[in-house]
């Protein structure tokens, strides 16, 4: 190490020692003195909260904009603002007043100075937080911020069929009860109970308007003042002072009406809000409550429906989560259950609407549904800028079909589309034939089990000509069975398939029979069977109606029930066994046996398949309405009776004689038979040509 390096190190050490010697020394007494100052209550601003300069400016602005002007004794102009626990007055640059914390009123001067001795650290921070929250709410809600706090109260609107509960908090309907309908739903299928149907209640239904302001104000956050205008009308009002107000007026007509008229009413609001915004938003969310015992079918028939203004009715998927955004005008929005619906009908269509539906994996609720819609051209100067109608009631076809008159929408609302009656052809059969007959019988007969019996007989009478023709064709096929067997025995093997088919068709033509003549009448009956399949599960008239052992024809008639979840069985078969479904299955097996006797020949595999079909229907229909199984049971039973009656009336000997007489007469071939024979000749010629080519190849 050289001399210069050594001198540098020594100089650095000297500087370090001098620096340490010059540092002030802290003694224990100094620390104790500092602790005494803190413990004796000397203000320590660092421990207290405070308003930033920006927050102070906002507070001054909010007091001026939202406070009540007054003149002090020295003629100074002041503004007093009372908002919840905050009571402050502004005059010039000075603010004074109190903030209530934990029941004590703290002076604003002590709060801002951070006088811990007088107010305490915790209460000082709470007071500052209360003022910040008030200033923030005033910045967002403006003059509506005074309605953020307040106690909740309930108001009832009621008629003969509907009982509504309105809440001062949000000003909306928070509970809707149908007085003429009961539910026996319980998460435990072994429990038996009966209560009135409650469509929604509490926070499971959130109905919220977004007022058209620079910062949208949500009515769900505000507390309204109820005004009972008369025995059927309630106004939920926000009183702004000096006669100005904004409110929602609900009117429920007396009698048996399920329609609530909702009018947005206001007075002298334009000068208060001073807003150019013209879009009134609607946010509607509802968790759809279960009402029926069978979840599978109820979930399958629940969803969001909506109708385009002047257009068709559409809906979201009912089997899975779904979402849609519509930029076209929408006339109404419906949250639909299997038998009940809540429908929002706009007098002036919604300009846009977004929908979402999410399946709830639980016992008591089916789906969470949300609709967000907007009505344009809101006018703050109008006393009644927007009107709506709320339908809260049953999916009853006669009721829904007449809603156009009650609502006066100026167009066909097509509300009956809420009832799933099948595709176009099946729906036409239901609306044009089945429902009118069913409604007519219901005017004279109160027992719906008897009505279903009479309806079944009526349908069988309508189908009787087709059924008779089908059976007569089957009788011809039974008579020809020995001849067909003889042809099959004479021309066995695949190489004689074409000849066998030609001989069989020639026999049919000579006897005046056709294998298709028995199938065609049955095919013509299928639309009615499918229409009934859609009608009974959607028929609310059957709901709660008892017959024999079934106490509710719209639900499964369980004779045995059990609790718990059995994999696959609970999901597809249910936790019960339906007696009408068992009877339908047994009758179906008997009918299959009788029908198999009418067939000239049946492949063994097909025979077993025919007997397995009734068992498949047992699993499929066990969760369906008892009324549907009862109808199919009656239909099959009457068909069996008809079969034996036809056997007695239509003698095979008479059929044989008629066929013999028909064979003597010259018969003109139908176009179908001529084309079929021509195709057979062409196939036979091709087969002979192939055989020749094979023989030539063998000789080579």
Image: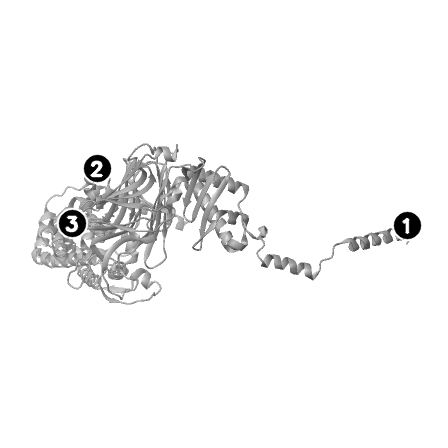
Q: Quadrant of the N terminus?
A: bottom right
**Does 374 appear above or below 151?**
above
Residue 676 visible: no
Q: Which is closer to the viewer, label 3 or label 1?
A: 1
For label 3, the residue is 513
Dot placed on the residue nearer the N-terminal end, 3 or 1: 1
Marks 1/2 in contact by CB < 8 Å: the verdict is no
Question: Could you give the CA–CA distance between mark 1 and mark 2, rounded to whole angstroms?
Answer: 107 Å
Mark 3 residue element: loop
Residue 362 coordinates in the image, percent (x, y) = 35, 58
Q: Residue placed at 59% from the left, 52% from the top?
A: 44
Mark 3 or 2, which is nearer the eye?
2
In front: 260, or 61?
Answer: 61
Relative to 586, say whether 138 is above or below: above
Residue 306 in sight? yes
Q: Which residue is mark 2?
A: 408
Q: Residue furthest right?
A: 3
Q: Earlier in the sequence, mark 3 or mark 2?
A: 2
Pick whichever of labels 1 and 2 is earlier in the sequence: 1
How many numbered marks have been drawn onto this rendered protein structure? 3
Left or right, 560 with respect to 129, comes to left
Q: Secondary structure at mark 1?
A: helix
Residue picked out by circle 1 = 4
Look at the picture and state if 268 lies above or below 7: above
Circle on res. 585:
none
Comparing 580 with 595, the one in front is: 580
| Dot 2 alpha-carbon crowd within 10 angstroms: few under 14, some 14 to 19, many 20 or more | few
């Amino acid at each position: 190490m050289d001399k210069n390096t050594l001198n540098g190190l020594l100089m650095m050490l000297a500087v370090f020692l001098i620096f340490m010697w010059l540092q002030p020394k802290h003694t224990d007494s100094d620390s104790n003195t500092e602790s005494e100052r803190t413990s004796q209550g000397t203000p320590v601003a660092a421990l207290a909260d405070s308003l930033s300069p920006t927050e102070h400016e906002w507070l001054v602005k909010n007091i001026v904009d939202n406070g009540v002007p007054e003149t002090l004794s020295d003629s100074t102009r002041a503004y007093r603002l009372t908002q919840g626990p905050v009571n402050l007055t502004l005059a010039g640059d000075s603010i004074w007043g109190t903030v209530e914390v934990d029941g004590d009123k703290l002076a604003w001067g002590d709060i801002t100075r951070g006088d811990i001795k007088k107010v305490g650290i915790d209460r000082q921070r709470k007071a500052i937080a209360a003022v910040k929250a008030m200033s923030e709410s005033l910045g967002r809600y403006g003059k509506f911020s005074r309605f953020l706090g307040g106690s909740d109260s309930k108001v009832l609107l009621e008629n003969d069929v509907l009982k509504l509960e309105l809440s001062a908090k949000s000003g909306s309907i928070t509970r809707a009860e149908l007085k003429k309908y009961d539910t026996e739903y319980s998460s435990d299928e072994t429990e038996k109970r009966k209560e009135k149907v409650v469509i929604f209640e509490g926070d499971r239904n959130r109905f919220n308007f977004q007022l058209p302001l620079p910062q949208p104000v949500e009515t769900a956050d505000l507390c309204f003042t109820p005004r009972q205008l008369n025995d059927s009308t309630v106004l939920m009002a926000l009183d702004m002072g000096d006669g100005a107000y904004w409110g929602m007026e609900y009117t429920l007509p007396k009698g048996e009406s399920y329609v609530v008229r909702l009018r947005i009413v206001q007075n002298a609001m334009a000068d208060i809000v001073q807003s150019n915004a013209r879009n009134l938003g609607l946010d509607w969310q509802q968790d759809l409550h279960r009402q029926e015992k069978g979840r599978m079918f109820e979930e399958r028939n629940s969803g969001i429906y909506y109708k385009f203004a002047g257009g068709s009715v559409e809906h979201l998927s009912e089997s899975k989560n779904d979402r849609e955004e519509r930029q076209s005008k929408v006339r109404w929005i419906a949250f639909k259950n299997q038998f009940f619906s809540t429908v929002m009908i706009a007098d002036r269509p919604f300009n846009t609407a977004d929908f979402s539906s999410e399946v709830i994996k639980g016992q008591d609720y089916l789906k969470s549904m949300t609709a967000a819609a907007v009505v344009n051209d809101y006018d703050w100067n109008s006393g009644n800028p927007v009107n709506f109608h709320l339908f809260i009631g049953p999916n009853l076809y006669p009721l829904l079909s007449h809603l156009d008159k009650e609502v006066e929408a100026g167009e066909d609302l097509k509300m009956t589309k809420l009832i799933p009656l099948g595709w176009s052809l099946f729906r036409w059969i239901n609306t044009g034939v089945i429902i009118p007959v069913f409604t007519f019988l219901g005017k004279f007969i109160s027992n719906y089990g008897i009505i279903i019996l009479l309806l079944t007989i009526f349908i069988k009478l309508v189908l009787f000509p087709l059924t008779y023709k089908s059976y007569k064709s089957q009788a011809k096929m039974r008579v020809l069975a020995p001849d067909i067997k003889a042809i099959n025995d004479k021309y066995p093997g695949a190489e004689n398939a074409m000849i066998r088919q030609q001989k069989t068709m020639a026999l049919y033509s000579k006897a005046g029979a056709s294998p298709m003549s028995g199938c065609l009448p049955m095919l013509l009956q299928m639309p009615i069977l499918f229409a009934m399949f859609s009608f009974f599960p959607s028929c609310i008239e059957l709901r709660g109606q008892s017959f024999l052992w079934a106490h509710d024809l719209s639900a499964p008639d369980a004779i045995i029930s059990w609790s718990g979840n059995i994999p696959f069985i609970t999901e597809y078969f249910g936790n019960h066994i339906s007696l009408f479904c068992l009877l339908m299955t047994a009758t179906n097996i008997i009918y299959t046996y009788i029908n198999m006797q009418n067939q000239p020949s049946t492949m063994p595999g097909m025979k077993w398949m025919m007997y397995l079909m009734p068992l498949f229907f047992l699993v499929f229909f066990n969760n369906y309405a008892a009324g549907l199984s009862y109808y199919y049971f009656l239909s099959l039973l009457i068909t069996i009776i008809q079969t034996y009656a036809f056997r007695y009336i239509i003698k095979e000997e008479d059929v044989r004689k008629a066929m013999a007489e028909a064979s003597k007469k010259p018969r003109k071939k139908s176009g179908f038979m001529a084309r079929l024979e021509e195709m057979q000749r062409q196939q036979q010629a091709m087969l002979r040509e192939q055989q020749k080519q094979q023989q030539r190849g063998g000789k080579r």
